[in-house]
Amino acid sequence: MTNFLLALRPPIDIEPTTDSAEPIQAGSFQNQTLRPILKGQNEALLAHFRHYLHKRKDTFFRLSEREQLDYIAHTLRTDQKFKNFLVGQIVGWMTAEERSTFLAQEAELTRRTVDLLIQRFQSQRAAVVGRF
């Protein structure tokens, strides 16, 4: 199963981090596991976010661009149910070894995952808006 999951991930080009303050294992996990999973699951994650917005009566679409960006960050940081759903979607694509690593550093890696989701949704805001 491990090889199957790894084979499904798209390759990504990442510059190695040189920030000595960053925990090496967490940074490596982010680049080797989280980013490829997020890239591979991009359409599904965007579909979940669009569905979330639609369930919220489309108020997102009446906001200015700046307010939409803030809304994205606020939603993923404060709506625990939705945040946990998305993180669960990502963890489901991890190998058993990666899940063990994730669970050993769950707070830090969940924070990194949410930060990556926020960046991804904000950078694709036009794709989210354009679909409705």
Image (cartoon, grey):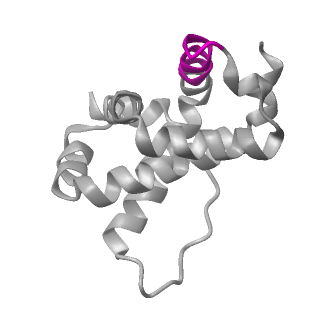
Please provide percent x and percent y for residue 102. 25, 50
Q: Quadrant of the N terminus?
A: top left
Residue visible at 53% across and 76% down in the picture: 17
Residue 11 appears in the picture as rendered: no
Please provide percent x and percent y for residue 64. 82, 38
Please provide percent x and percent y for residue 86. 42, 31
- For the stretch drawn in magenta, the main secondary structure is helix
Residue visible at 57% across and 24% down in the picture: 49
Residue visible at 82% across and 40% down in the picture: 65
Is residue 4 positioned above or below 132 on the image?
below
- Quick one: 5 or 79, which is closer to the camera? 79
Q: Quadrant of the C terminus?
A: top right
Instruction: Please give the count of numbered marks on the rendered protein.
Output: 0
* 54 to the left or right of 125: left
Is residue 36 positioned above or below 52 on the image?
below
Is residue 89 positioned above or below 123 on the image?
above
Q: Is residue 70 magenta?
A: no
- Quick one: 108 or 81, which is closer to the camera? 81
Q: Write down the quadrant of residue 3 in the picture.
A: top left
* 60 to the left or right of 38: right
Is residue 34 positioned above or below 17 on the image?
above
Residue span colored magenta: 47-57
Please provide percent x and percent y for residue 15. 62, 69
Considering every residue shown, the one lying at the far bottom of the view is 20
Residue visible at 16% across and 56% down in the picture: 104
- Quick one: 31 or 46, which is closer to the camera? 46
Residue 88 appears in the picture as rendered: yes
